[in-house]
Image (cartoon, rainbow, N blue to C red):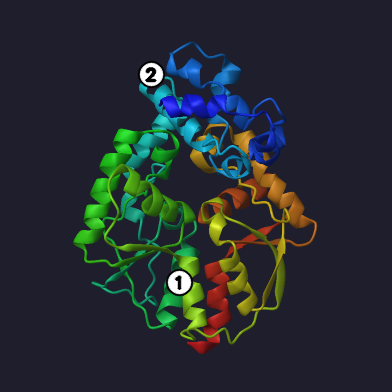
Amino acid sequence: MENYKHAVESCIDCKKCWDVCPVTKVIGNEYTPQSKIELLSKIESGEELSEKEFDDIYLSSRCGACNEVCPVDIPIKEIIQYERSLLAEQGREPDKTTYIVQSILQHNNPGGKDDSKRFDWVSDDLQIAEHSEIGYMVGCWIAHARPEIARATIRVLNAAGIEPMLMDKEKCCGLFLVDNGHFEQIKKHAKEYIDYIESLGIKKLIVSCPGCYRTINNSYPDFYREPEFDVVPAVTVFEELLDEGKIVPENKLNISAPLKDACHLRQMKDTPRKIFKQIGVETTEIFDDEIVCCGAPAGLKPNYPQTSADIAMLSVNKSKETSDLMLAYCPFCIYHISGVSENMDVNIQVKDISVLLDDAIKKSK
């Protein structure tokens, strides 16, 4: 990875990455994206790391904010991923990271939940096709923690005359494997999953989780090949159905609340705002034009729970200045922020876009 060495050496010490890093926002300048990549040569040579240096590599959600502001285009999040891959190969990654990797490979979800319960959320009112060219991938966090998102999503699709197919052998997308540099495992994982989805005849796969979308659409081609089906975030499907008049928001909600953006859909941030406007929801910005990670992904939550919680509270505290309701379109954000708020005894409700859209079109069913 000689190109990474040159990339690190090209750093101009502007410190722009410091300003946007969620970890740096809550801990201070002790752990920065810049300090992380400066450990590259030490990790490549297998040198011993101090506890602080070791923590530095894993104190990252790999949200990508640093990449966006770097004026010399250093691929910071990719370098962190590579450093983690080396530490994994050297047997030096955190025990909790290894445990979650094994949970994904053995139990098909990061939390080691009973995979046989993945579809326990399905209710009798949902119209689901046995076979269809349109598939719906629920995702681990929705299936095991936020089932209301899955039910609302399918009800919205049903209202538009769409009966999606569920996949009996749905898998965790494997984003955690990608984030932590488990390249051989994600290669095998991606191959098995793409081949399986294509064997079902699915031409369009709708996903509610931005992380699932990013992994299948962007990472799988790097580790295996381009899928022969389209991967589509649920929010873009909602936008199309509204634009085409296939669903009609007859019950305008008349709500105003701050919107928590999803890191993995940062290039599509206008889409949820447009949907909310159409259903009578006025969105306000939490951090102006900046997208700040919730603090959960890439192993940050299990390995450094206090830092992860402090990052979540950045959004909660700002949101609470204007509302007890927060809007979101990422199930992992909702799961994490809701849990942290409850633990901190802070009263805030976090609602997914699918649930509110379902409420808005109920009268049109």
Mark 2: few/some/many CA within 10 Å (<14, 14-19, 20+): few
Mark 2 sits on what residue? 90
How far from the left and from the top, in percent, is residue 51? 57, 17
How far from the left and from the top, in percent, is residue 7? 52, 29
Mark 1: few/some/many CA within 10 Å (<14, 14-19, 20+): some
Mark 1 sits on what residue? 237
Q: Residue at x 32, y 40 (%)?
A: 186
Amino acid carrying label 2: it is: Gln
Q: Pick the residue in front: 163 or 291.
A: 291
| Quadrant housing the N terminus | top left
How far from the left and from the top, in percent, is residue 190? 29, 46
- Would you place residue 3 above or below residue 169 in this image? above
Res. 106 in view: no
Which residue extends farthest top? 48
Separation of residues labelled 1 and 2 (CA atoms): 43 Å
Q: Residue at x 68, y 51 (%)?
A: 290
Q: Pick the residue in front: 236 or 103.
A: 236
Q: Residue at x 49, y 18 (%)?
A: 41
Instruction: Classify mark 1: helix, strand or loop.
Output: helix
